[in-house]
Image (cartoon, helix red, strand yellow):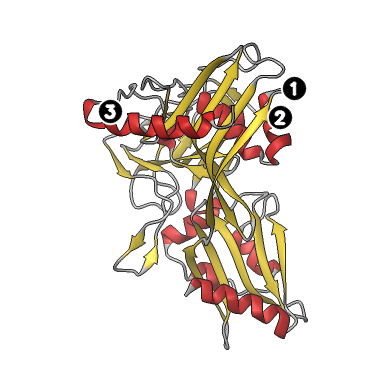
Amino acid sequence: MLKTLIYLSLLSMYLFGTSMQTLSWKNGETFLNFLDNNSLPSTLYYDLDDREKILTEEIFAGIDYQVLVNEDNQTQQVLIPLGEELQIHIYKTSNDYELKIIPIIYQTKTKTDYVTVLTSPYKDIIDTTSNPELARAFLSAYGKSINFKKDIRFGDIIVIHYEQKYRLNDLHSTPTILAALSETNRAKKYIFNFQDGYYDEKGKELDKYFMVEPCKYKRISDGFTHKRWHPIRKKYRPHLGVDYAARTGTPVNAAASGRITFIGNKGGYGKTIEIKHQNGYKTLYAHLNRYANVKKGQYVKKNKRIGYVGSTGLSTGPHLHFGLYKHNRAINPYKVIEKTKIKITAKYKSAFRQKVKTYKSTLDQYL
């Protein structure tokens, strides 16, 4: 159905003089501002349920979106990404406009790239692949297991085997590195993706965690998901963060060291704090009851108290909504929150060894 809809949209571009524009979401623009600026009815927002309204707060400055307009410059369709799996779809009907949250249609390709280090791994990966996200993912995957400033030399070799999503023929989302090889001084260091973690050849998990849980809690009332189908409402209901159910007034701490970039009311999120961290990470703390003695622009260290659990904004009870973003894309916080090292148990050793054998063979072909 979605593919048919897109095909018909593209067909109309030729038959009815419509054109597709790719635009960038403006800094400070809200979803209601966007509707007003594009002569779209505000009921598209007000008819949403509370959870869907909160999702509109996940549209960040710099995100690319598409608008289909006719020859009179009237909006026919709009596609706005929400994370990596879903998008807001606004489209014109015979009488008015409708809004739905639908899956993003993308294609996934498996690729292997060979890179010779001439300046730095980061720059050389970008120069070779034209994919900055791949460079960031490579450095993140290796974590602290290699000091790329000291250990890598001119002429060293990097091989990356990964999956990349494409949307409308453009790169979409952060690539998933399946395996990688860094060869320096003729010594090879492999890493392998297994069960959402990165391991060396012997099955030891790499150390790359730098965040801690932001508060004490009774339970996790809602986990992270990019795309969840609600069978009763017949809607997709993503949740781009983790909800910690806790008593009102429970202290909230910075999950990692960084600088506060936002403190104030943020629509359905109520009283909110955002902190910018190293390597393109950002954390969001929402529905706060009140703030601690902190201000915008202040640098805070990990575990610094920044606020207190509450139920402000569109909330059904006291809890902390904790969001984590990498270059403004929502990711699962538990991929980077500090946790006990995972050892590959006997149950999975056979599967891990088979994956190592397969991926090593792929990587070694490029040497």
- Disc 2 marks a residue whose amino acid type is Asp
- Disc 3 marks a residue whose amino acid type is Lys
Tell me what residue is drawn at x 76 percent, y 77 percent.
Answer: 73
Q: Nearer the viewer, residue 328 or 349?
A: 349
Give the alpha-carbon distance from disc 3 to disc 2, as whole Å: 34 Å
Q: Nearer the viewer, residue 257 or 105?
A: 105
Give the alpha-carbon distance from disc 1 to disc 3, as whole Å: 38 Å
Marker disc for residue 6: none
Name the N-terminal-most of marks 1 and 3: 1
Q: Disc 1 designates what residue?
A: 119
Provide residue 141's location: percent of width, then percent of height. 51, 29
Q: Disc 3 designates what residue?
A: 349
Name the N-terminal-most of marks 1 and 2: 1
Provide residue 176's location: percent of width, then percent of height. 50, 40
On screen, residue 346 versus residue 73, left or right, reads left
Q: Quick check: 289 above or below 213?
A: below
Dot 1, how many residues are within 10 Å of its Cα: few (below 14), some (14-19), or many (20+)? few
Q: Residue furthest left?
A: 347
Q: Disc 2 designates what residue?
A: 124
Marks 1/3 in contact by CB < 8 Å: the verdict is no
Describe the element under mark 3 as helix, strand or loop.
Answer: helix
Name the N-terminal-most of marks 3 and 2: 2
Query: Quarter-wise, where is residue 258 in the image?
Result: top right
